[in-house]
Structure formats: C-alpha cells, structure tokens
Amino acid sequence: MEKFNGVIVKHFDYMESSLILHVYTIEGMKSVLVRGGKKFKSPFLGAQNTMSFVEFHASGKAMMTAKEMTLLDSFPGIRSSVEKTTYASHMLELIEHFADGGIDHKKAFPFLVKILAKIDVETEYIPYVNMFESKLLYLLGVNPHFRECVVCQSHDHLSFSIQEGGMICDDHPHANNEYSHQCVELFEFLYYYDLQHPSSIETDHETLAELRHLLDAYYWYHLQIKTKSRTVLEGFLGY
Ligand SMILES: [Zn+2]
C-alpha cells in the first residue's frame, strides 16, 4: 500500500462503473483506478473530481487502485467561478503537458497546490496564475533573463524580447519595445516573487492583459503550446 497526496488533473470513465484518475504528485503523474467510482454510492464521491487535492492510499504497480481517498481541499472558491476554474484548468493542462519533460516535481507540485489555494481565496487572483506560468518557465529551463542584455550584458536601453528570452538593448535586431515597462516589471516581480514572504502585488487590468499576451507569446515561441483552456478564456476575456 502506498500513501501519497495529489491533485486530480483529469478523469476518464473505465469499464462499466469505474474511473481512471490522472493525478499530479510530488513524483510526477500517476494513474489511479477507482473501482465503482462512477456509481452514485461511490465512497469517494467529491474526492474524485478534477482539481481536487486528495490523499490517496493505493496499491498496485503500473496501474494503482485506490483503497482510500481523503479530500484535503476541493477549492470551493475556484469551483464557484467559471473564470477561476478555466484559469486553474489552464495551469493543470500545462502541468500535464510538461510532467514528463524533466521538471522538478518536488518544486512544481507543492507550488501548484499553493497557487491553487491562493486562487481559491483571492479576489485579485490573476497575478497568481501569471506567477505560476512565470516560475514554470524556470522549471522548464526556458526562464526569461531580466537583469541585463542577454546578448552583450549591457544595462542600458533595455526592452523585452520574446525571441531572445529576455532583455536586450537597442543595438540588436530584435529590440522593438513591444512590451511596456510596467508589463515587464510585473513579469519580473512575479517571476522572483517569494510566496514564503509575500508582499502586496500592485497592478492594473491593462498591465495584466498585456502580460497575458506576453506569456502566451513566450509559451508559444519557446514551448509551442497554447492550452484549450486558454482558448476558452478568450471567450470570457475578449483577448
Ligand atoms: Zn546588448
């Protein structure tokens, strides 16, 4: 019997009455079979939903079978908002997509749980989604460089370049000042933000919308991904 905590990223019907859960854990993705999970009288109802943070007792090797599941957090504040749910689904899609890509799960898993807890309770929660995306770039090895020109290490006349993966000065072809100073400053602030020693996050709608575009472009250029949830968000946000 193995005991572990995980966030349910996806679930599938299996056979007549069972479910298979894809669970993100501190060791990466695991598949867990829940016998009778589809039945109304399943003892695990509530604990087997997507996005739930759950403690599992499970047995088996390649495919584990759940023996006990305890709901640690269902994130009710996320579930009650379609927009929060879509942002959280965007994060889960990113995690699932990159889980086998060599990220450090010991860092990524507790971070994901902390960010979900923040989104759950905060009204101004979008910076926490952006913080997750920013720090995930570091875990994926395509982190942006903010402190100096990535080409010549100059500190003057810098602007952010998606292609170069950071700041570059006016002397280079990709310099175009496409992103505002406020947007790049917020990106850097969230990238370095320490959740252990939180400070207030001050921003506005316009800057967040611009950062949304920057992150989308960065993920597309360096990782070739746009999530389905991001496409759904376009419907709500209009961008
Ligand atoms: Zn330079």
Image (spheres, grey):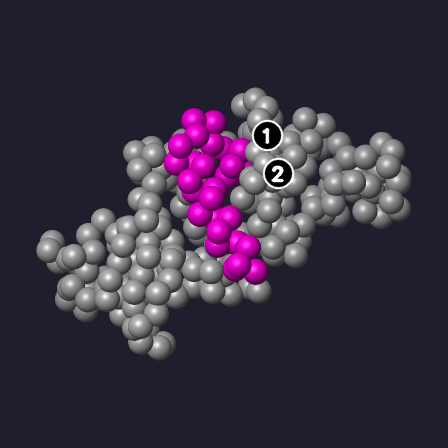
Q: Give SS at disc 2.
A: loop
Label 1 or label 2, whichever lies nearer to me, is 1
Answer whether residue 181 is visible to the viewer in this image.
Answer: yes
Front residue of 57/31: it is: 57
Q: Choose between 22 and 224: the one closer to the eye.
A: 22
The picture places residue 155, in percent across and down from the top left corner, at 86, 37
For disc 2, the neighbor class at 10 Å (few under 14, some 14 to 19, many from 20) is: some
Q: Main secondary structure of the magenta part?
A: helix
State the image coordinates of residue 65 (x, y, percent, origin top left). 27, 70
Within the image, what quadrant is residue 148 found in?
top right
Helix, strand or loop for disc 1: loop
Seen from the viewer's position, the closer of residues 31 and 157 is 31
The residue labelled by disc 2 is 193
Tell me if 23 is positioned left or right of 230 in this view: left
Q: Is residue 181 magenta?
A: no
Q: What amino acid is labelled 2 in the image?
A: Tyr
Q: In this view, does 28 lie to the left or right of 71?
A: right
Side (left or right) of 227 relative to 203: left
The residue that appears at 42% across and 40% down in the rendered structure is: 117
Residue 199's disc is 1
Range covered by the magenta-colored residues: 103-131
